[in-house]
Amino acid sequence: MNSFEQKFRIFSNRCTEDYLIRYANKGLYKRSLKELDNGVTVDYTWNETSVSCELSEGSTCTLENTLDHWQCSCPSEQICKHVLISILYYQREHVTTDIENSSVQSETEGVTGVTQESELVEISVDSVDQASSSTGTVSRFSWMLEADLTKLIKSLSSSVIEEVLFRLRYPEAIKVLEDSLLTVYLVRQNIEVSFTEEPSLAKALCKVKQTAGNIAKLEALLRYRMQQGIDDTESLNTKAFDLKFSLQTVKECRIILADMLKTGLARLPESYIAELETLAITAHSGNLPDIERSLRGIQGELQLFFNRHVRFSMPTLLNRVSKLYLALHVLEQEKASAIQQSQLIGRFRSKYYTVPELHLYGIGADAWETSSGYRGITYYFCGLDDQQIYTYSDVRATYYEDQEFSYTEHYGSYIPWLPQVTFRQFAGEEVQFSAVKVNEERRLSSGEGAKLTILPRSEVENVNIEWLVQEASSILGYDSQEVSLFSAPKEQLAMVKVSRILEHHFEPSTQDLMLTMLTEASEELVLTLPYASDWETTIKRLESGYGAVALEYFYAFVRVEQQQIVPISFLKGNTVFSLKLDLGYGRMKRLGRL
């Protein structure tokens, strides 16, 4: 017997009805059986690593001992009936031949006098029956819990592993069915992955193909292991990060920062700003995105210093310089783990991962501008299922010439998911996303593929946002955020229950509008809205008490920054008022009438 024919015989015995139906579909399997019953035959020509199959109706196909690789003369791009017929016909002929051989041998040699070849055939045939026994089911799939995971994922890219690790953060119900295959059904995603007895992800069956199929296979395996009490998160982290950056650029940046600290701010020449710009460009070329951002942040602070601007802050500058210098020092030592290095280096563009469903509740929008040359609007949402803050940011770099960003134009433009809805409407809606992409910081992507449904908006008083609500005393007790090298600083956000606005005035010395609130807990809380030329009209209206006198018993959504509590929006009933952006639309008065 040809050596490949032996391999193919074992393979054909593993091709049970369940296996072929899950690899193809039930209709195709039944059509193949019907054609065999109608008299279709197959001739086999055995090659070194494949078999050529010629069907009596004229089609030809080439098979290996796996369904991952096959060829057929028909135009189908998916597995076709000719492939199934070739396997099923061989199974029928193989079983018939074995029975005849067994009968002849039992008559001439006795039951115990079988040849070595027939023993091999019996073992391969019996393996199918053994696989169906209750005692064999557990042992055949035990590799899913016991196999070395690093070997199973060796062929997968770091991006696939990283995406699966992210998906594991979100709940996903699974159903497990054990028969000739072990099938894991991902309920929310409506995806089935069927595992064979072979310890290999490549042999698993899934209708989703290519990279998405690899993601589904690994996710199904890991969720099955999680169900059995095995957590693989830590062991997968190292595989998920693949780093390449310029160590020479790191050394140059650290040396220039050290020179700046030795020179001192008072004697620092203005030409140092141009030097930082050159260094930021070098960091960009050296694949050091967070280093580039930090350099531009320091550059912006120094620009405020040289311009004698009231917004210049010495603690902020020292914090930026200290954190960057320490990060450069750690990278230069080359002793940090791959995960820590990736956290220090950052990314030019955040990676986004598909989340099956998100139920979000709009809580306001905030316009901003950074000292490093970016302007944008961030839209905030509460995740009603997981009690997390999600954001969507519309951002533009303005440090190049002729680059402008109009807050009014962008706020009134249409969102990417539904062309008839503006961002102004989007900020105050309750929505349901399907297949939306989200990054590590829970920022939403505007990429294609996501489906958005606008839901009837619930009144904020009836929505579970208690996890976000804080008393004034706890907000005032916030310490300045600790410097953390290995994680991005998080916004300190809170919701405050307000009874009414006690007093409002503009502070000329700091160029801030001060709003004094009385909370429902009878505590006073001062909110600070910093002055900027873009908000001159807004601040004047608020200073005059525009719409604020009648406003009572509402929620204030705030951010804590630099020992100040900055208001983002007010919420009451089903209305949201974003302070910087909504005054021109009359929402403040409407909020006061509720």
Image (cartoon, rainbow, N blue to C red):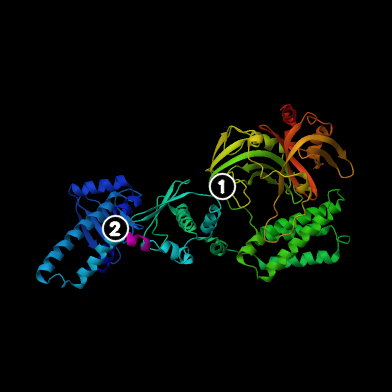
Tell me if residue 137 is in the magenta stretch.
Answer: yes
- Specify the amino acid type for callout 2: Thr
Residue 189, compared with residue 154, is above or below; it is above
Q: CA distance from mark 1 to mark 2?
A: 40 Å
| Residue at 67% across, 32% down | 573
Q: Quadrant of the N terminus?
A: bottom left
Closer to the camera: disc 1 or disc 2? Answer: 1
Residue at 55 percent of width and 50 percent of height: 170
- Amino acid residing under circle 1: Lys
State the SS at label 1: strand
- Secondary structure of the magenta portion, mostly? helix
Q: Residue at x 13, y 64 (%)?
A: 103
* Residue 147 magenta: no
Residue at the disc numbered 1 = 437
In the image, which residues are magenta?
133-139
Report whether 277 appears left or right of 129: right
Q: In the figure, is residue 307 to the left or right of 76?
A: right
Quadrant in the rendering for residue 501: top right
Q: In the image, which disc is placed on residue 218?
A: none
Rendering coords of residue 62 (x, y %):
29, 58
Q: Nearer the viewer, residue 217 or 349?
A: 217
Q: Picture coordinates of residue 280 (x, y %)?
A: 72, 58
Q: Does the rendering let one see residue 413?
A: no
Pick the quarter of the image with the C terminus.
top right
Query: Quarter-wise, where is residue 139 in the image?
Result: bottom left
Q: Which residue is disc 2 drawn over?
A: 62
